[in-house]
Amino acid sequence: MGEVQRSVQEWRATSERALVRAGARPLEAAVQTDVLIEAELRGHPSHGLQRLPTLIERMANGVLTPGQDPDHVWVGSAAARVDGRGGFGPVAARRAVELLVERAEVEPCVVATVANSGHVGMVGLYAEQLAEAGLLGVVLSTSEPLIGAPGGRAAIVGSNPIGIGVPSTPGPFVLDMSTAQVSMGKVLHHRLTGRPLGPNWAMDGRGEATTDPHEATALRAFGGGKGLGLALAFELLVGLLSGTGLGEEVAGTLDTDRPSTKGDLLIALDPTPFVGEGWRHRSSDYLDAVRSSAAGTDPVLVPGDRARRSREQVMARGIAVSTELAATVTALANEKDPS
Amino acid sequence: MGEVQRSVQEWRATSERALVRAGARPLEAAVQTDVLIEAELRGHPSHGLQRLPTLIERMANGVLTPGQDPDHVWVGSAAARVDGRGGFGPVAARRAVELLVERAEVEPCVVATVANSGHVGMVGLYAEQLAEAGLLGVVLSTSEPLIGAPGGRAAIVGSNPIGIGVPSTPGPFVLDMSTAQVSMGKVLHHRLTGRPLGPNWAMDGRGEATTDPHEATALRAFGGGKGLGLALAFELLVGLLSGTGLGEEVAGTLDTDRPSTKGDLLIALDPTPFVGEGWRHRSSDYLDAVRSSAAGTDPVLVPGDRARRSREQVMARGIAVSTELAATVTALANEKDPS
């Protein structure tokens, strides 16, 4: 299977055209596209352009509604509830970030929940936006049940990712991780190509580890019982606070025919009211000490470093996607096939 | 090495007497003792009575000061800074919990930082207290550098634990976990007894995994790079917000001669202002579904279940500690040796 490489600007324009053609307003199309492109830039194609056909099919099926402005209501001095009104996930999440940044000027800890909106993409992007606004950011999101408990017969909890951003030089610390050992996309890819799974990736219907991609019915959490505990805790925090689904109730981030019932939770924290301005250099000093703790010559990488490198490289050389995906996306934009 | 088993009440009284004899006020002695006893009840002796001699030596050395009432200042509508004034960790953390619970009556998200106070014990205890007050609780704490990065020559980040509590029936969901693969106490115990370490527990001075307890210079994070990322993120969140140490700056939770420079961060969230009262049954329903996802006859356990079982058993049969620790603690309380 070959690849098609085009410049970042070209893919951006193609994605925006495809979304507008499907009914999105230009601003929505730009915000949604930005999230897909940024995932490609950071080396996470699982959250990149391959999501576009699903989004457009969701629009065609009426379970993702373009033209919606998110609503919000403040439920406390420093707590907001955002209703995405069935629209694009990144549009609602960006509204939540804007609300947090604005309110953080007067409140050192602000929280926002998001319900009724689509998949937000990489949660780290929003944590990074908060960090770039000078705040500490924590972002959680839920998904369909994908992870099972050891000894359990089915998936019971989402691969619930966490993003944590902290201002730093030369760029923010950005943790972006799922609580699953690997993505379900990776398991499905191994199923298609007939390759065995890694030993800790997945389990079968009896809750036993399996390396047979056809036997796998649920992912394993990363890090054993601790990772599973975090996945469950994040499910509860997000689901209860945002009034969105728990476990089996969650749908609409991977399929094309069900309304989205997942939720998001964003927290912004400003150290300055707690400790004054002196904190700003401390994260950079500490992270430099971590980087220089390497026993060899290659520095230890901290969260955000690899994505920053990837971003520079992909900006320079362009984004490569499979010939098949390129043809699909190009057709959705009604452009001439680039392959 | 034998064991001495005494009732929970007897150990509680002995611990309180030892602390008061060392200079603690009775209320402080009770609060600190409660944390040690609750760790024993939950099956975590690493945070139990074996910490008592260290605490008393810290008092003798003037780096843990009894008789201190924590100070606090509100830095926002829903954000407080607690200063433990060099006193007992559990006293300052309990004050933070009280502040959060009180303010949560009017604010749906409240945060408190704690600085200048000793080791808090199991962070899950405070998350559980918030859950018992009907709130979602998240509690983070830092420690001395104990975890190293793969390829790093030394520990650079604490084994920073997280506690997350959620109200539920028959008892709260309580996650309580460190970000290290195992405790440093476990590594030291293997060094004393000459047994090899597990394959993922620790690394040597070149940042390579080692099973030789004498070569181990740093713990490994749980869950590989994701766990290390969480440990670093928690270090930054707690250290920056509370104005306490980062990395090498952190001391005073394991040693007996340095003031405590670790910090704590507590967050309380109330779903009711976001979604109304209907959320209260949802966590129990969901967790019951998780428990009954078992393929076999034994239910899947969720965080909090094991500790609840342990607590019932230890309450009934009493707390067993090593003959040596029993003699030490009893001598500190100036009681007759029970062994």
Image (tube, coloured by chain):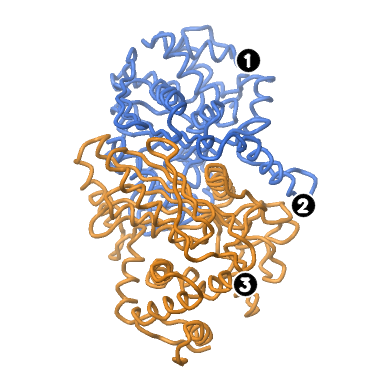
Chain colours: A orange, B blue
Do the residues at pointers 3 and 1 share their chain?
no
Residue A230, visible in the rendered structure: yes
Q: Mark 2 sits on what residue?
A: B295
Q: First in sequence: mark 1 or mark 2?
A: 1
Q: Give the residue displayed 28% in from the left and 28% down from the top.
A: B258
Q: Mark 1 sits on what residue?
A: B7
Q: Are marks 3 and 1 in contact (CB under 8 Å)?
A: no
Q: Is residue B68 left or right of residue B3?
A: left
1 vs 2, front mark: 2
Q: Quadrant of the C terminus of chain B?
A: top right
Secondary structure state at the residue bearing disc 3: helix
Looking at the picture, which amino acid does disc 2 mark? Ala
Q: Residue A195 in the image: x percent, y percent?
A: 63, 77
Q: Are marks 1 and 2 in contact (CB under 8 Å)?
A: no
Mark 3 closeness class: few <14, some 14–19, many ≥20 residues within 10 Å: some
The chain letter under disc 2 is: B
The chain letter under disc 3 is: A
C-alpha span from label 3 to label 1: 55 Å
2 vs 3, front mark: 3
Q: Mark 3 sits on what residue?
A: A188
The chain letter under disc 1 is: B
